[in-house]
Amino acid sequence: MSEIQGDFPLTIMFNCAVMEHIVKILSIIPVTHDVKSFRFEKPAGYRYTPGQATDVSINQPGLRDELRPFTFTSLNEDEWLEFTIKRYPERHGITDRIHRLRPGDELIIRNAWGAIEYRGPGYFLAGGAGITPFLAILRQLYKDQTISGHMLFFSNKTSADIIYEEELKKMLGEQVHFVLTREQKRGYEHARLNREYLAKQGFDFGKHFYVCGPDAMIADVNGLLANMGALPETLVFEK
């Protein structure tokens, strides 16, 4: 499963008891032309590891059992929980319905889960909405003043698609690379995260590689990194 958000039904099975929490949306903040930040109530004692997701449904008739995975982009110490969700109107699915919600509407969240978690200094490679699992990790590193030495390669179609561009610049400075695949624009790199591009980066293969995006991108990037010298245990991604 990639990007940790979307309109495809959840098929992962859990061995632990699933707890459901009905939470009210507190605020909705536009981020890009098709991305919004949803802040909502935080159940007492609810915690997660930065990078993890939960299964979400809309608390409305006919939609309560329509579960989809979304990543937390808030920090544990925040008084609210937050998702940063991209809308896919062409799918006529759950992200489209969530984008129509208003403050006061309710979601249902479950246990936190996910394989993407911080394991040490390294490189983050994200495609589109695949940045979302990394936001809480980077925000925590920045808050803890330990973000130095990390690097982000963030691929999007155009500059208008970049999620939280200014915040990422503030956190990472020159260590963030905005890569555009369908637009040539001053101040941005025009390329793809392919062998030619990755080979130029001078990676330290003793560090970790965090990869998230569409399934095809994850497979391609992981394969390229492995061929270049990355060990399997250094590749962190949602399987």
Image (cartoon, rainbow, N blue to C red):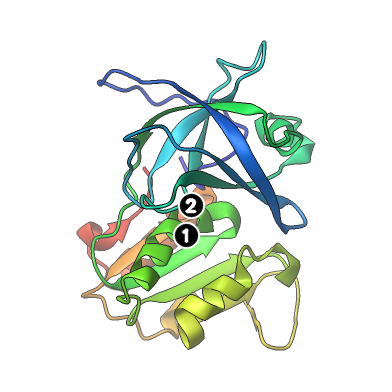
Q: Are marks 2 and 1 in contact (CB under 8 Å)?
A: yes
Q: Toward the viewer: 196 or 14?
A: 14
Residue 16's place in the image compared with 145, above or below, is above
Q: Answer with mark 2 or mark 1, whichever residue precedes in sequence.
A: 2
Q: Secondary structure at mark 1?
A: helix
Q: Is residue 13 left or right of residue 214?
A: left
Viewer can see residue 183? yes
Rendered residue at 52%/58% (across/down): 131
Tell me the residue that label 2 is attached to.
73
Per the image, label 2 sits on a secondary structure element best described as loop
Q: Taking 142 as reference, is 89 above or below it?
A: above
Residue occupied by mark 1: 135
Image location of residue 232, percent across then percent down: 24, 58
Q: Amino acid at mark 2?
A: Thr
Quadrant of the snapshot with the N terminus: top left
**On the image, which quarter does residue 93 sit in?**
top right
